[in-house]
Image: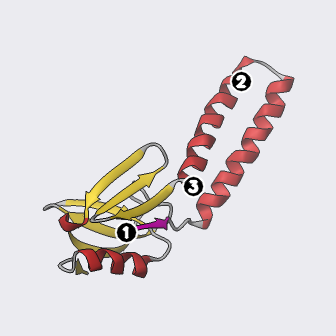
Amino acid sequence: MIKVYKSKVAKWYIWFCIGMTIAFIGSIYLCYMSTWVLLIDITFVGICLFMMYDMLLHTDYTVIGDKLHIRCGFLFRMDLPISKISEITHKSTILSSPALSAKRIGLKYGKTNWVYVSPLYQEEFISTLRSINPEIKIS
């Protein structure tokens, strides 16, 4: 059984991507008209823009058998055995995590470890996890 859940994306993230794209296009125009300093700016903004769109397009949570594969762009990948998840909680937080929305689900694994995800269909995601591990507590 393989189920893929795409991340919920906050509107502010989309607007930020659009703004950065406009800044990148403006930098290209100014670089064409000016010097090397703007070329460095284009390189920096281009790398940031690539990373932002990579996260936008490749943030998902895949259930493969009894494992949860969490991916956020090329920077973050994690395989979490669903049997290790002990608690699920709903959180609104902006802590660094593989999620593109502030409305997140906290997954507790181990004694003190948490990872926060933001699947688009949260209730379906939770029921899928609980169908594999019915001992997961929801708080």
Q: Quadrant of residue 34?
A: top right
Specify the amino acid type for callout 3: Leu
Name, please, the residue furthest toward the top: 36
Q: Is residue 105 left or right of residue 43?
A: left
Q: CA distance from mark 3 to mark 2?
A: 25 Å
Which residue matches tag 1? 1
What residue lies at 56% left-to-right and 47% top-to-bottom?
A: 54
What span is in magenta?
1-6
**Residue extending furthest toward the front:** 1
Quadrant where the image shows the C terminus: bottom left
Secondary structure beneath dot 2 equals helix
Say what amino acid the circle numbered 2 marks. Leu
User: Do we see residue 8 in this rendering?
Assistant: yes
Residue at x 28% of width, y 67% of height: 107
Quarter of the image with the N terminus in it: bottom left
Mark 3 crowd level (few <14, some 14–19, many ≥20, 10 Å Cα): many
**Tag in front: 3 or 1:** 1
Q: CA distance from mark 2 to mark 1?
A: 48 Å
Q: Residue furthest right?
A: 33
Assess whether residue 40 is covered by the magenta stretch. no
Residue bearing mark 2? 39
Along the horizontal axis of the image, is 9 left or right of 86?
right
In terms of image quadrants, where is residue 61?
Answer: bottom left
Of the two numbered discs 2 and 1 in the rendering, the one whose residue sits closer to the viewer: 1
Amino acid at circle 1: Met
